[in-house]
Image (cartoon, helix red, strand yellow):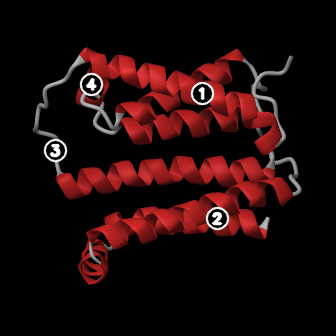
């Protein structure tokens, strides 16, 4: 599970840098330039995702707890909601206007759904860490930005787009889930 832990740690550290050390992030952006910084950041994220996927596949899981649910409709709906919220965070729809942190809330739905359906060591490591990271980000963003005061204009068309894009992403991930992660999202 070393590769899985390395990927999770890399993901957590690189995503937490702006919240924990904003001055270091700003200095690095100035030194590299905005585009180069984004490129390096993206490459590190891609590297962490590859470590997570290959680490997941190579890890031998052991039971930690008996999951209350298994693969099924409820877990799938929670993941779908998570994906919709994830994409809604990038659009000026009503979901983003009403929810301060739709991306982090979506991550909590996704991670929580997986923790309800999986009780093995690699699932607890991966999805538990992502849930903790999402909560950490919510706290750090709230601390950094203070109370939410702005009211942005919103359009329902962006909510529809988020639902469609989230639904398509859900279908694509669901289709490849068995081959990528070795688990069918819905037991047939």
Quadrant in which residue 180 is drawn? top right
| Front-most of residues 178 and 115 | 178
- How far is disc 3 from disc 2 in space, using C-alphas? 33 Å
Residue 142, percent across and down?
26, 50
Closer mark to the observer between disc 1 and disc 3: 1
Q: Residue at x 76, y 53 (%)?
A: 122
Question: Pointer 2: what residue?
Answer: 7
Left or right: where 78 falls relative to 52: left
Closer mark to the observer between disc 1 and disc 2: 1
| Front-most of residues 71 and 161 | 161
- How far is disc 4 from disc 1 in space, using C-alphas? 20 Å
Q: Which mark is residue 170?
A: 1
**Callout 4–callout 1 Cβ contact below 8 Å:** no
Residue 84, percent across and down?
46, 27
**Callout 3–callout 2 Cβ contact below 8 Å:** no
Q: Residues within 10 Å of mark 3 (few under 14, many from 20)?
A: few
Q: Residue at x 76, y 38 (%)?
A: 118
Q: Quadrant of the N terminus?
A: bottom right
Q: Residue at x 78, y 43 (%)?
A: 181
- How far is disc 1 from disc 2 in space, using C-alphas? 23 Å
**Callout 1–callout 3 Cβ contact below 8 Å:** no
Closer mark to the observer between disc 3 and disc 4: 4
> In the rendered image of this protein, does residue 177 appear above or below residue 166?
below
Q: Earlier in the sequence, mark 1 or mark 3?
A: 3
Residue 16, percent across and down?
42, 64
Q: Residues within 10 Å of mark 2 (few under 14, many from 20)?
A: many
Q: Earlier in the sequence, mark 3 or mark 4?
A: 4
Q: Residue at x 10, y 37 (%)?
A: 150
Question: Pointer 3: what residue?
Answer: 147
Question: Pointer 4: what residue?
Answer: 93
């Amino acid at each position: 599970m070393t590769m899985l832990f390395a990927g999770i740690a890399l993901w957590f550290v690189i995503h937490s840098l702006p919240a924990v050390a904003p001055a270091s992030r700003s200095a690095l952006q100035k030194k590299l330039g905005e585009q180069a910084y984004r490129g390096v950041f993206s490459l590190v994220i891609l590297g962490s995702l590859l470590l997570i996927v290959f680490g997941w596949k190579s890890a031998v899981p052991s039971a930690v707890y008996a999951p209350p649910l298994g693969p099924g409709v409820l877990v799938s709906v929670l993941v779908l909601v998570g994906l919709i919220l994830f994409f809604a965070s990038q659009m000026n729809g009503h979901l983003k206007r009403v929810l301060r942190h739709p991306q982090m809330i979506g991550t909590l739905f996704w991670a929580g759904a997986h923790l309800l359906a999986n009780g093995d060591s690699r699932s607890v490591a991966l999805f538990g860490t992502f849930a903790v990271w999402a909560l950490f980000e919510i706290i750090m963003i709230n601390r950094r930005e203070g109370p939410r005061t702005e009211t942005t204009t919103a359009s329902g068309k962006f909510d529809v787009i988020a639902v469609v894009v989230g639904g398509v992403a859900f279908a694509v991930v669901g289709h490849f889930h068995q081959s990528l992660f070795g688990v069918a999202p819905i037991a047939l």
